[in-house]
Image (cartoon, rainbow, N blue to C red):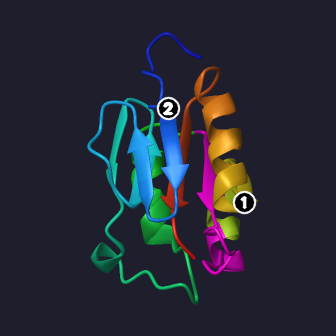
Amino acid sequence: MPDDIAPAPLIRSLSWGHMEVEGLAPGKDFKLFPGGGREWDWSETGTQHHPGIGTADVAELLDHGARTIVLSRGMQLQLQVPDSTLAYLAERDIRVHVAETTEAVRIYNELAATEPVGGLFHSTC
């Protein structure tokens, strides 16, 4: 990890509808990035399961220096990731991992120790 970039907070626990993240209050859904994070309020960008995670959802992660992004699709893979969002990230040379939430947490926590990673995590469906 570059010395001038703070690591992203680790996800300490995950269960249906509940996540605990290092340095943050417990919550349901999170936006995490180098140096911090916050609860992910879908109403800010109009996010819904379909069409799914939009470019406005990932932009904040990039603004905080994430060079790799982990996108969780929910515990039952109901949250979609449209091709337009993947294209937006590819145009910016951002590596992307898309996975079921449990797997997304594993990938994210592994990357958080070594590179500037960000992620969007949905802890229910």
The residue at the point 44 percent across, 66 percent down is 57
The front one of 103 and 66 is 103
Q: Which element carries disc 1, helix, strand or loop? A: strand
On the question of residue 88 being in view, the answer is: yes
Left or right: residue 81 versus residue 2 is: right
On the question of residue 92 being in view, the answer is: no
Quadrant of the rendered image containing residue 112: top right
Tally of marks: 2
Left or right: residue 63 versus residue 102 is: left
The front one of 28 and 88 is 28
The residue at the point 41 percent across, 39 percent down is 21
Residue 109 drawn above or below residue 25: above
User: In the rendering, at what x and y percent does residue 70 appear?
Assistant: 63, 51
Residue 44 drawn above or below residue 66: below
**Label 2 packing within 10 angstroms: few (<14), some (14-19), many (20+):** many
Bounds of the magenta segment? 67-85
Type of the residue with mark 2: Leu
**Label 1 packing within 10 angstroms: few (<14), some (14-19), many (20+):** some
Of mark 1 and mark 2, the one earlier in the sequence is 2
